[in-house]
Image (cartoon, rainbow, N blue to C red):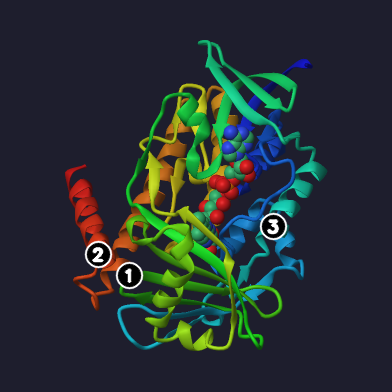
Amino acid sequence: MANDKQDFQVVIIGGGPAGIATSLTLTSRGISNCIVEADAEPTRKSGEAIPPNAKPLLKKLGIFHLLEDPKHLIYYGNESSWGTDKLEQEEFIQGIYGSGYLLDRLHFEKQLRAHLKTNDGVLFMGYRLRKVVRDGQGIQVNIKKDKDEVLLTTRYIVDATGRKASVCSHLGIKKQAIDSQFAVTFKALLNEQIAHKICVEATENGWWYAAPQQGKELMIMFFTLKQLIPNKSEVADFLKKELDSSLHLSKLLQTAKLDLTHVKIMPCGTSRLDTAYGENWLAVGDAACSYDPISSYGITSALGSGLYAGHALTDALANKKDAMLTYQFIMETTFQEYMERLMVHYDLEKRWAKSVYWKDRFLQTEAITRDFNQS
Ligand SMILES: Cc1cc2nc3c(=O)[nH]c(=O)nc-3n(C[C@H](O)[C@H](O)[C@H](O)COP(=O)(O)OP(=O)(O)OC[C@H]3O[C@@H](n4cnc5c(N)ncnc54)[C@H](O)[C@@H]3O)c2cc1C
C-alpha cells in the first residue's frame, strides 16, 4: 500500500463542471490545487441543455471553444405546452445571445478533463474520498484508489461532489431538500431528424422533456413525484401510459422506437446547503445547490459557482476578510432569484388542480413563500 503525502492550497473533491471551473480559476490565479474524481473515466450524466445566456460565462472560463465541437448541437429554442393545450414556440434567435447548445454530455465531461490537463491541472482520477479531518490549522484529506492511499494536506477543501454533497456529509453538514421531484429518463429513436429544439409538456402527473441528440436520437425525461413511480418491472408500462396522456409528445413519438430497457430513475428536485461555506471548506455546483431541471440552470450554475469560488478562495488565502461572505451572498441571491422564477413558472399550470403532482407544486410554492416572508 503506497502512503503518499502531498500538499495543495486547495483540494477539490469532484471533477464535474463545478470542480473543473473551480480548479481552472484557482490555477489562473496561481493557487496550487488538485481535483479528486471518483470515476476513472467520465460517465454519462443527465443534463445537456446550455441556454444562450451561459455563453459569456463559458468565455470567461476559457472553455467556450469546447462547445464548437461538432459532437454538440446548436440549440435553437423551446416548444412548450405549459398552462395551455397549445404548443408555444420560443426562438432564441430573437434574444441577444442567439442560440444555445445541446451537449453530448459524455463528450463534454471528457473535454473538460482534457482541457484541465492541458492547463496544468492536477487530477487524481479514480480516487474516492475516504476521510476528512479538520485540525484547526487546515484539513487532512485521505483518498483511495484500490490499494493506493494518498494523504492530501490543504488549507481549504471544496465540495464539488454533486447532489450528494459528500464532503459536507463527512463534515456533518446537512443539505436541505426542498422538493422530492424525481426524473425517469430514457432514449428514443425517431424516423427522421427534427429541429434542434427542446420540447416541454406538462401532463396530469408531471411534465415531459425531450431533447434532440446526434442523428435521430431523442433524450426523453419524465419528471414526477417519487411516490408516483412504480417498481422497476412496471416502469415501462407506466411511461407508455403517461406518454399517451400527452397531447404533443405522444404525436412526435408515434412511430419512434422507445428504448425502455435502459430507463434511469434519479432525484432531481431543488435542494441546498444553508450556507455554502464554513471553516476551511466551501461547496460549489450541485453540492451547494441543486436546481430543478425545468430551469436548465444546473450546468451553468455549476460553472458559475466554480468561477466565483475560485476567486473567493484566492482572496481568502490572501486574508481578504469578506471573500467567503461575498461568495455566500452571490449564491444566496442567485438561489432566491431562481426560486422566485420557479414558483412563478409552476404557478402558470392550473389545468390539473386535483392532481397529486400539481397539488404538491402548489404546496411547495406556499411553503417557500412563507419561508421567504419570514426571513
Ligand atoms: C434528470 C436531470 C436533468 C438535467 N438537465 C439539465 C439541463 O438540461 N441543463 C442543465 O444545465 N443542467 C441539467 N441538470 C443538472 C446538471 O446535470 C447538474 O447541475 C451538473 O452536472 C452539476 O455539476 P457538478 O459539477 O456540480 O456535479 P456533477 O456533474 O454531479 O459532478 C460531481 C462529480 O463528483 C464526483 N464524486 C462524487 N462523489 C465523490 C467522492 N466521494 N470522491 C470523489 N469524487 C466524487 C462524481 O463522480 C462526479 O463526477 C439535470 C440533472 C438531472 C438529474
100 or 271, nearer to the observer: 271
The first of marks 2 and 1 along the sequence is: 1
Q: Position of residue 93 (x, y in %)?
A: 56, 81
Q: Position of residue 145 (x, y in %)?
A: 72, 28
Front tag of 1 and 3 = 1
Q: Is residue 13 visible?
A: no
Q: Quadrant of the N terminus?
A: top right
Residue 51 drawn above or below residue 369: below
- Residue that appears at 71% across and 78% down: 215
Secondary structure of the residue carrying tag 3 is helix
Secondary structure of the residue carrying tag 1 is loop
Q: Which mark is residue 278?
A: none
Residue 365 drawn above or below residue 351: above
- Quadrant for residue 124, please give it: top right
Identify which amino acid the numbered label 2 is placed on.
Val
- Residue that appears at 29% across and 62% down: 343
The first of marks 3 and 2 along the sequence is: 3
Q: Quadrant of the C terminus?
A: top left
Q: Is residue 241 left or right of residue 63?
A: left
Front tag of 3 and 2 = 2
- Quadrant for residue 111, please give it: bottom right
Residue corresponding to mark 1: 205
Secondary structure of the residue carrying tag 2 is helix
Identify which amino acid the numbered label 1 is placed on.
Asn
- Residue that appears at 66% across and 37% down: 38
19 or 320, nearer to the observer: 19
Whether tag 2 and tag 1 are in contact, CB under 8 A, the answer is yes
Is the residue marked by circle 3 packed among few (<14), some (14-19), or many (20+) residues within 10 Å? some
Residue corresponding to mark 3: 106
Q: Is residue 39 left or right of residue 197?
A: right
Mark 1 to mark 3 CA distance (whole Å): 30 Å
